[in-house]
Image: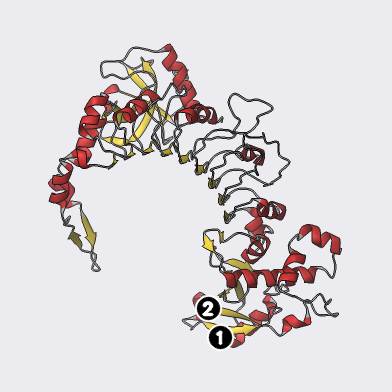
Amino acid sequence: MGESSSTAAWVSLQVAEAVEENELGICVGRRVHTVGNPQRIGTVLYIGPVEGQAGEWVGVEWDDGNGKHDGVVAGVRYFMASREMSASLVRSKSLSIGISFLKALHLRYRGESTKEEEDEMYVLSSSKRRVSIQLIGKSKIEEKLKHFEDLHGASIPYMGIGSVNPSHEISNIVPNLKELDLTGNLLSRWQDINSLCEALPALEILNLTNNLLEINVPELSSLKSIRILVLNNCGVSWKQVERLKQYLPAVEELHLMGNNISTTTPIPFEPDIPNVEGFKSLRLLNLEDSCINLWEEIMKLSNLRSLQQLHLNKNKLNRIFYTTNHPLPALQDGCHAPFENLECLLLGSNEIDALASVDSLNFFPSLVDVRLSENPVTDLSKGGVSRFVLVARLAKVKILNGSEISARERKESEIRYVRLVMTMMQSADPQEINVHHPRFAELKSIHEIDDDKPSAGISIPQKMSASLITITLMCVGASMGERQPLVKKLPPTTTVGRLKVLCESFFKLKGIKLRLFLQEKDSPLPTVLDDDMVPLMDAGAGTEATILVDEEN
């Protein structure tokens, strides 16, 4: 599947060939919803007869993919849907082309709730009885909203908005609107978006999530005041983004989640200017849930000098690199570092599997907030490493996976990491150690850790044996009953197998085969400690760690 939805491509072709509207205003390419359910939205791909059936039928591909076929019925293809089982044939009377913007605004903010709706406003008491909700100040709010000129923010999601009123009508009613949420409506024409912005000169924040927008981007002269633009799941390609940027001189946040974007190639592409230019005010770019698999595509964004946050969760990236040798054009004020002001980089749920990628993050000049969760490199079951290793390797990062790194955590993590590497030096080439652990020598010097080689039979420096780590042990096994957690100080060299024996003694669990889990504070699930020979330090358990004591199934 390409960058933009194949549905959008098909629709554009059909619109070009255009058919007449039927009596209800439905035509090929039109966005519609089912009557009575504005959240059941789709695109019309066919209008006409169906073999063996009387009257006119409408072929619709549904956004939620919940249909009956892909346009083939009884062996006859009437249209081509982008996915199997995403389309169906329905009668025109069961579809709606929606309502106007102002009508939706009226229904949302001036419409009175029915008795049935108010009866559904309740909470459950502790005895599971319904307790009606009384909206305090409801009448005052409704009275205020009768004067739409006082309205600065409007949220009109899934109201079936399919058309925009004349600009003067809108500006007369809501002249001071600054924030507008139009999520999940039937808007598809960029010209309608432009007209809306023209009517709302104060508008700064516009959310168009889940509105499937047309491929061709016309001149959009009225978007110049937009600071935050949300185009999540709108079928937008990077080519369209390149076209849009000239009309968004003030944009500070651009959200493009779920658009199947796989490339960020500038349009038009020039070999001597390979990177994206413009977007001089852009601070946040959200490309989550896309299809980007090459870090080279991300490096094309490195000239966006105002960029502070880059959201890349849920892509297909398997490595990261940073190099000043990456081809960068000289700007008028001279050369500059790639991503020179980037502070936050979210890389969760990708395919990053090498610590070299983690180490490369140290070269980003301003980076302090990183997310690496749900990557192979952080998954212990796939050979990944614990949080303390990441903290130690990331010299400047202050927030990791959404959790702040305290001064204490950093110090302890770095010391543990150095000692872990020192255990490896017994069997590894020192030069190889320095290559694979680039911060090792630096950290050893910072924390004044002795360089003495451990004596035979001892896995870490003798000095380490005198230091203890504080562990909280919690019984969670079904047959163990309720037992108070215990806090114990143990040598970090204590193996998982030895800790199992100690737990049997601490909790009087004779005859129960134990299984231990490490619960880390930023991890949604505990990590099983299934190697009895591994020391707690190597398993990632440090001071104030929590070990869950369970029983084998």
Give whichever of discs 1 and 2 has the lower sequence position.
2
At mark 1, the secondary structure is helix
Q: Is residue 206 visible?
A: yes
Up the image or down, 386 lies above or below 254; here it is below
Judging by the rendered image, the residue that carries numbered circle 2 is 475
Residue at image coords 58%, 43% = 315
At mark 2, the secondary structure is strand
Please provide percent x and percent y for residue 465.
Answer: 73, 83
The residue nearer to you, when weighing 437 against 44, is 437
Report, in whole angstroms, how far the alpha carbon at label 1 lies from the one at label 2.
8 Å
Q: Quadrant of the C terminus?
A: bottom right
Judging by the rendered image, the residue that carries numbered circle 1 is 507
Please provide percent x and percent y for residue 356.
Answer: 72, 53
Label 1 sits on what residue type?
A: Phe
Q: Are marks 1 and 2 in contact (CB under 8 Å)?
A: yes
The number of numbered discs placed on residues in the rendered structure image is 2
